[in-house]
Amino acid sequence: MSDESPSQVIEAMFADLSDWRGATLSRLRALIKQADPDVVEDLKWKKPTNPAGVPVWSDDGMICTGEVYKDHVKLTFAKGASLEDPDGLFNASLGGNLRRAIDVYESDNVDDAAFKALVRAAVALNKATVRRR
């Protein structure tokens, strides 16, 4: 069993990608932390084909996950369907009742301010949901 924290594993995971996907996920991770300094990083859904698991960012509930694919990275917002997206960042998983995702390809440039606003909105929704319980 490793003594590394989930944050350390996530950092190493992104560094090991050594291409644009690792750099993109590292940048988006930094933006998540800037938007929510209280964010908790974790790894979930470990399996033989993905032994490290999927990076998850939470604050009073899941904010989003980060996944790596061959030609893109995906940030899936757990309650994305309930979030305003005035800048149109969500471009995947648009048909569901709960989640929304942002697929980022190599040539894409995610707007920092818009992304941080989306993260803050997800955190606010989580906190409002916790207060209602």
Image (spheres, rainbow, N blue to C red):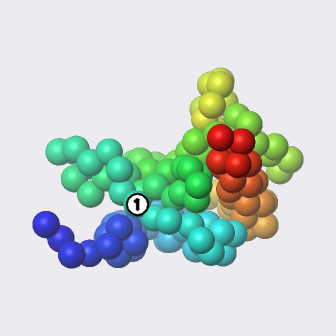
Q: Residue at x 60, y 45 (%)?
A: 77
Q: Tell whether 95 sits left or right of 49.
A: right
Q: Tell whether 111 sits left or right of 69.
A: right
Query: What x and y, as percent, mark residue 44?
Result: 35, 50
Query: What x and y, as percent, mark residue 43?
Result: 36, 57
Q: Residues within 10 Å of mark 1 (few under 14, many from 20)?
A: some
Q: Residue at x 32, y 73 (%)?
A: 5
Q: Tell whether 116 sits left or right of 58.
A: right
Can I make out residue 122 in this image? no
Q: Residue furthest front?
A: 133
- Please identify the quadrant where the C terminus is shown: top right
| Vertical side of 20 occupied by 126: above or below | above
| Vertical side of 116 occupied by 83: above or below | above
Q: Residue furthest left?
A: 1
Q: Tell whether 103 sits left or right of 48.
A: right
- Is 104 in front, or is 124? 124
Can I make out residue 3 in this image? yes
- Is 18 in front, or is 66? 66
- Please identify the quadrant where the N terminus is shown: bottom left
Residue that mark 1 sits on: 42
Q: Amino acid at mark 1?
A: Asp
Q: How many marks?
A: 1
- Is 69 in front, or is 67? 67
Query: What x and y, as percent, mark residue 84?
Result: 81, 43
Q: Indicate the secondary structure of the residue bearing disc 1.
A: strand
| Vertical side of 25 occupied by 128: above or below | above
Q: Residue at x 69, y 53 (%)?
A: 127
Query: What x and y, as percent, mark residue 45?
Result: 32, 45
| Vertical side of 131 occupied by 14: above or below | below
